[in-house]
Image: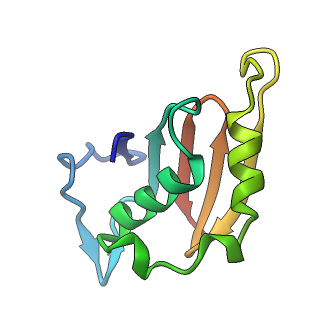
Amino acid sequence: MSSKIKIISGKDAPTPAGKLVTNGGRPTRNIFEAEFDPQQERPSMILLDTIAFIRNVDPVTLDPLAEAIDTDALDTLLTAQSDPDTHPIEVTFSYEGFHISIRNTGNIRIRWNE
């Protein structure tokens, strides 16, 4: 995956890259962020890779993202040639037990639905 994933926790130090600590299959961290290049990468694919990374599974084992959101519309909206500083776009939705916020700036923020 070409995006950068960093694990965020409210008060704990991040775990080393690729080392997720789990509690019964659920990561002990509850907020995750990833960055991608909206002009070079499909946001829907980066999102799937990120969720798979968090869950420590192969992306093909996840529920189809298209059941939660129109992936073509998501990719088109977030990769449009508009300037994210003057025309910011943020899409939020739930998927795989997470609340997801993805922006045309190339930022993804993922947190467990509580």
Is 26 on the left-hand or right-hand side of 101? Answer: left
Is 25 on the left-hand or right-hand side of 77? Answer: left
Q: Where residue 6 sits in the image (x, y, percent)?
A: 35, 42
Residue drawn at the location 54% of the way across and 58% of the way down? 111
Q: Is residue 7 visible?
A: yes
Residue drawn at the location 72% of the way across and 22% of the way down? 84
Vertical side of 6 occupied by 83: above or below: above
User: Where the C terminus falls, by quadrant?
Assistant: bottom right
Out of 21 and 96, give the one closest to the viewer: 96
Residue drawn at the location 23% of the way across and 65% of the way down? 21
- Res 107 → quadrant: top right
Out of 96 and 71, give the one closest to the viewer: 71
Vertical side of 46 occupied by 112: above or below: below
- Res 34 → quadrant: top left
Q: Where residue 54 sits in the image (x, y, percent)?
A: 36, 63
Out of 18 and 8, give the one closest to the viewer: 18
Q: Where residue 45 sits in the image (x, y, percent)?
A: 51, 55
Residue drawn at the location 39% of the way across and 40% of the way down? 3
Is 64 on the left-hand or right-hand side of 66? Answer: left
Out of 108 and 78, give the one closest to the viewer: 78
Q: Is residue 114 visible?
A: no
